[in-house]
Every structure is written in C-alpha cells, then in structure tokens.
C-alpha cells in the first residue's frame, strides 16, 4: 500500500467522524477523489421507494387492508455513485433501496445529511451540464427534507439551458413543490418560452395530487394561448376523470356553433 492510498483512507475516516456539514463533506470528497468514483447515501423523502434500479412513488394502503400486503419496494436510502474527472463530476448513477456491490477503488463516505445532499446536488444541476445536470435534478428532489423547487424553477425558466434539462426541472417542480401550480402556470403562459418546456409544464400540472392542477388546466383550455398548449391541456383534462373537466367538456359540446 503506498503512502497516497493511506492518506485517502485516513482522511475518509476523519470525514465520516467529524461533524462537518454534508455539503462540505461531498465537496471535499469530490476534490479528494480527483479522478475516480465517489459513493454516498442519504435518506429518501417520504413516498419514494425503489428496488435498486427502479424508483416509484408509493401510495398509502387503506387502513382496511393494512397488513394484508407489503411491497418489496424499499423506502431508501438513496445511493449515489459519482464518477469524477480532475475534480469535476462527469456522471451520476443513483439507486433507491438495494445495497452496494464491491466498491473496487471507489471512495465511500457513507451516509450524509439528506437536506444538505439535496442542496449540493441541486447546485450541481444549476452549474453542471449534460446528463450530469439532468441526473442531479432527479437526485436533489428525492432527498428527504430538501426544498429545491426554487432552484429547479430557475433552471426551467433559463432559456440558455438545455431543453431536456429544463423539461426535467419542470417535471420535478410539479412533483416537489406544494405551491407549484402558480409557478407551473407561469411557465405555461410564457409566450416566449420553448414550446416543449411549456407542454411539460402542462403535463406537470396534470400530475398534481388531488386535482390541484385542474383549475389551471381549465384556465388554459378556455384561454387564448398557443393552440398546441390548449390541446395539451384539454388532453390531460380528459385523462383526469375530474367532474370539473366533465363539466367543461359538456359546456364545449353543448355550446351553439
């Protein structure tokens, strides 16, 4: 074992024991790896589960059938493997549940604060590019206790960013933000915005729980926005099975031509 390897192992042990903020720990570990692979894990937010490579959002079973059936979908932790070159993350792989295989030459810093991990990865999404930024968006949103939607909204609105990254940010804003409807509606109504990003915002509205997005979708359908956007809203209203959507369709179909 050479002296350089000894330094890595000793320092990793210090990081695991010292009460440093997780963001510092990740940043320090990235610099320490230099070129190689970093592993870490953190608590997943409630409702997120996985079987290793697949991820789902769990629904709560009714109390009547409680204990009758249990899913193999594990509620975390979130495990992230980060490939690094010259101190810069170049690729992310993340898993929910399961367990690590042999580490090889990877540096594993173990469990870190979910909130700080969310902050660190959303910052990577804001400053990174390509697939790393897109994966960082997803990782940041499934961290427990993290509030990342304001940063995601900035990404979604930034016309200088990659369209696929912006669409990913829009999707996760719809999943993560309790007050996302107003933010998503603003994206839809931006006449200067990319049409694909605006369509993704319509889809995100349709995915809001408990029909939260239906009033906004109705407003879009009844409004004077780009016909492509209105058609998207009408389509998702049709998928919603919401009584308010049925009322709208009745109005349209019975309106004198």
Image: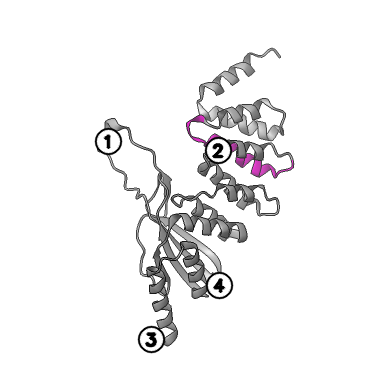
Circle 1 residue: 66
Circle 2 residue: 179
Q: Quadrant of the C terminus?
A: top right
Q: Are marks 2 and 1 in contact (CB under 8 Å)?
A: no
Q: Main secondary structure of the magenta part?
A: helix
**Which comes before the other along the chain, label 2 or label 1?**
1
**Which comes before the other along the chain, label 4 or label 3?**
3
Q: Is disc 4 surrounded by few (<14), some (14 to 19) or many (20+) residues within 10 Å?
A: some
Give the extent of the magenta segment.
Answer: 192-211
Q: Which mark is residue 1?
A: 3
**Which comes before the other along the chain, label 4 or label 2?**
4
- Residue 46 magenta: no
Residue 106 percent location from the top left of the image:
43, 72
| Front residue of this view, candidates 176 and 236 | 176
Q: Which mark is residue 87?
A: 4
Nearest to viewer (mark 4 / mark 2): 2
What residue is shown at x 61% (from left), y 42% (from top)? 200
Does 88 appear above or below 94? below
Does 93 appear above or below 34? above
Q: Quadrant of residue 64?
A: top left
**Which comes before the other along the chain, label 2 or label 3?**
3
The kind of secondary structure element at disc 4 is: loop
Q: CA distance from mark 2 to mark 1?
A: 31 Å
């Amino acid at each position: 074992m050479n002296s350089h390897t000894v330094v890595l192992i000793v320092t990793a042990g210090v990081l695991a024991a010292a009460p440093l903020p997780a963001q510092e720990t990740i940043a320090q570990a990235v610099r320490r790896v230099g070129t190689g692979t970093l592993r870490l894990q953190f608590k997943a937010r409630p409702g997120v589960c996985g079987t290793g490579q697949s991820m789902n959002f769990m629904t709560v079973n009714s109390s009547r059938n409680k204990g009758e059936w249990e899913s193999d979908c594990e509620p975390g932790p979130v495990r992230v493997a980060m490939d690094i070159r010259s101190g810069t993350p170049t690729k992310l792989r993340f898993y929910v549940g399961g367990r690590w295989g042999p580490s090889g030459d990877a540096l594993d810093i173990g469990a870190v604060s979910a909130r700080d991990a969310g902050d660190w990865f959303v910052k990577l999404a804001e400053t990174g590019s390509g697939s790393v930024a897109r994966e960082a968006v997803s990782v940041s949103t499934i961290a427990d206790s993290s509030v990342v939607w304001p940063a995601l909204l900035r990404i979604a609105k930034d016309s200088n960013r990659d369209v696929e990254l912006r669409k990913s940010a829009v999707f996760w804003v719809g999943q993560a933000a309790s007050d996302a409807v107003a933010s998503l509606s603003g994206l839809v109504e931006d006449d200067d915005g990319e049409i694909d990003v605006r369509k993704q915002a319509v889809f995100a509205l349709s995915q809001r729980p408990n029909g939260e997005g239906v009033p906004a979708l109705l407003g879009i359908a009844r409004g004077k926005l780009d016909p492509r956007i209105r058609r998207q809203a009408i389509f998702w209203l049709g998928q919603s099975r919401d009584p308010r959507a049925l009322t709208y369709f009745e109005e349209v179909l019975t309106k004198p031509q």
